Image (spheres, grey):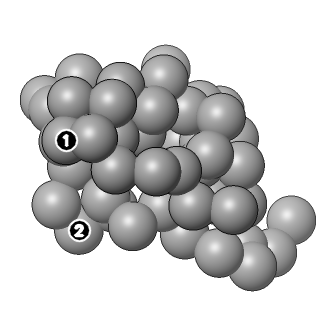
Amino acid sequence: MAAREMCPFITTPPSNDCYCINADSLKIPSFLEYCTNNFQRCNFYITHLKKTHVSPAR
């Protein structure tokens, strides 16, 4: 699976619970699912946008 688009928070994760932080073997499936291509569906991404009152990327 090639990543067409990476989460904009991959370099500056919004929380310490973000899948981008300490991507260990338990987080790899979620990292692949939510930090690439599908980041608009990630709970961390959505929650951070709501806190900062920014519209999600489309």
Q: Residues within 10 Å of mark 2 (few under 14, many from 20)?
A: few
Q: Nearer the viewer, residue 24 or 4?
A: 4
Which numbered mark, 2 or 1, is in the foreground of this view? 1
Q: From what the image shows, is residue 45 above or below residue 50?
A: below
Q: From what the image shows, is residue 55 above or below residue 58?
A: above
Q: Is residue 16 left or right of residue 49?
A: left
> Residue at coordinates 34% horizontally, 50% vertically from top-left?
54
Q: Give the residue pinned by disc 2.
A: 11
What element does badge 2 sit on? loop
> Residue at coordinates 33% horizontally, 30% vertically from top-left?
50
| Residue type (three-letter) at the residue carrying disc 2 | Thr
Q: Quadrant of the N terminus?
A: bottom right
Of marks 2 and 1, which one's residue comes earlier in the chain?
Answer: 2
Question: Where does the image place residue 29, in percent across and percent down from the top left?
Answer: 65, 32
Q: Is residue 1 left or right of residue 15?
A: right
Q: From what the image shows, is residue 5 above or below residue 37?
A: below
Q: Quadrant of the C terminus?
A: bottom right
| Residue type (three-letter) at the residue carrying disc 1 | Thr
> Residue at coordinates 21% horizontally, 49% vertically from top-left?
13
Residue 23 quadrant: top left
Residue 12 seen in this snapshot? yes
Q: Give the residue pinned by disc 1.
A: 52
Residue 37 quadrant: bottom right
